[in-house]
Amino acid sequence: MSEKFDAIVVGAGPAGISCAYDLAKGGASVLLLERGEYPGSKNVMGGVLYRKMMEDLIPGFYKEAPLERPITEQRFMMMDKESAVTFSYKGMEWAKEPYNNFTVLRAKFDQWFADKAVEQGAILINETVVLECIVENGKVIGVRTDRPNGEVYADVVVLADGVNSLLAQSLGFHKEYRPDEVALATMEILKLDKKIIEDRFNLEDNQGCTIELFGDATKGILGTGFLYTNKDTLSLGVGTLLSGLIKHKIKPYELLEYVKSHPMIRPYIQGSEPQEYLAHLIPEGGYNSMGKIVGDGVIVIGDASQLVNAIHREGSNLAMTSGRLAAETILSAKEVGDFSERILDQYRTKLLSSFVGQDMKKYKDSTHHFDKFPQYFTDYIPMVNKAASQMFTVDGSSKWEKQKKIWSDLGTTKEKMKLARDVYRAWKVIK
Ligand SMILES: Cc1cc2nc3c(=O)[nH]c(=O)nc-3n(C[C@H](O)[C@H](O)[C@H](O)COP(=O)(O)OP(=O)(O)OC[C@H]3O[C@@H](n4cnc5c(N)ncnc54)[C@H](O)[C@@H]3O)c2cc1C
């Protein structure tokens, strides 16, 4: 038999690295396997990294990590074809230590983060694809990789291989996801002079802005777009449910081109040079799509277990928290020398009672709801834009007349009742 570890972690994304970091710190022997040339080389994210979850792992990480900008302003743009209603919050408390959140480029960040796990004692091997789990008497005892004699063994295998986790699927932990359970996102990293970025987004040095795009950014299909500021690049992307793209026969890159040429976005990116084009799936099925996450000798974490809060564009923080909770569970299992499903199930209990499980349950019906009732994006956002245009146009009519006009544009009494019902329904699924 080849080498045996306490744990093998498959996938060096935020989930896998966090888990490997804490396991190694806790004295376990850990092998971290990554298929990419280096951690982050294949990874895609709009780019918001949440400080709290990183600080839980590495206090003061922001003093040395390759971060782009601290986010000091968050804008939300509800877009119609030639207009947008925007609201935002900007706070100087986010511009100073310990900051709030940061924009990052995963190719740089993941590499740095994985090095930190290696400093703790984890062994990282890149360019290694895990082909399958080795199962003996119903227990996972190791993995088979694409390297010659590539079998490696461990007391526990942690699957952190990201959305669609083929490894968890082959163990029968979840079925193949339906197109309405995953979103497909495409994004570009656009090179732009640092000073121009700061002028266009009203930023000072070491300040950053995120803009979330709703409505026409996705041509009304359920999904969102984003435009984030990095040091001297912008991250611009758009993601929609795969089922929406199929139904509307739109190719993902066509949607991205549409956003780039939209009159509300074009001025921000004018003169920029595309540096990188990226595409990736996002698990958006929510709590009801989560499969089995614990078995004998195996734990599933991060995107591999559908841990994404699409309403709040959170994923990396859920991934990191799940990685830490998995590490905590494995270290206790190591103390008693029992890696059975019964003992490892503590991970599931801890995860579901943490903010991760709470939020997954809170928004369990949100994707399904907004997918079933597309009028929020197709009708109501244009309606808000039209009302704003009418209200803010000074044309000699009184404000009473304007309010009456806006009210009558909401339609017949029946249509107004439907609108009120939809607002109530939306409140119920996200409350
Ligand atoms: C366009 C886009 C924008 C996003 N924006 C945000 C955001 O702003 N903020 C946020 O918090 N989240 C965001 N997310 C979600 C976030 O990226 C994910 O939730 C997060 O990366 C999940 O981490 P993970 O470690 O579980 O998976 P991943 O980051 O996908 O990592 C999985 C790793 O496993 C490796 N791997 C896969 N299969 C194998 C195998 N068989 N053998 C070896 N290695 C393997 C992969 O190469 C990869 O390195 C976004 C996602 C996308 C696609």
Image (spheres, rainbow, N blue to C red):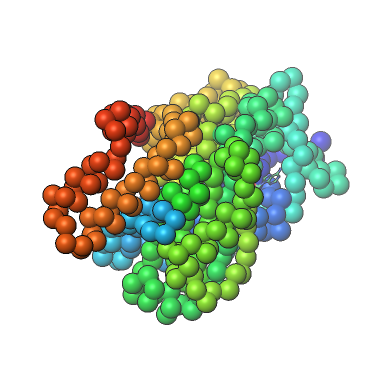
* Residue shown at the point (40%, 42%) measured from the top left: 379
Q: Where is residue 109 drawn, in percent x and y?
A: 54, 60
Q: Where is residue 56 drawn, in percent x and y?
A: 41, 49
Query: Can you name the residue that lies furthest to the front here?
Result: 396
* Residue shown at the point (37%, 77%) measured from the top left: 199
Residue 245 visible at all: yes
| Direction from residue 88 to residue 299 in the image, left or right | right
> Which residue is nearer to you in this view: 98 or 250?
250
* Residue shown at the point (53%, 74%) measured from the top left: 272
Q: Is residue 379 above or below residue 204?
A: above
Q: Where is residue 154 drawn, in percent x and y?
A: 69, 36
Residue 213 visible at all: no
Q: Where is residue 59 drawn, in percent x and y?
A: 40, 56
| Direction from residue 12 to residue 78 in the image, left or right | left
> Which residue is nearer to you in this view: 140 or 313?
313
> Which residue is nearer to you in this view: 232 or 397?
397
* Residue shown at the point (21%, 62%) measured from the top left: 395
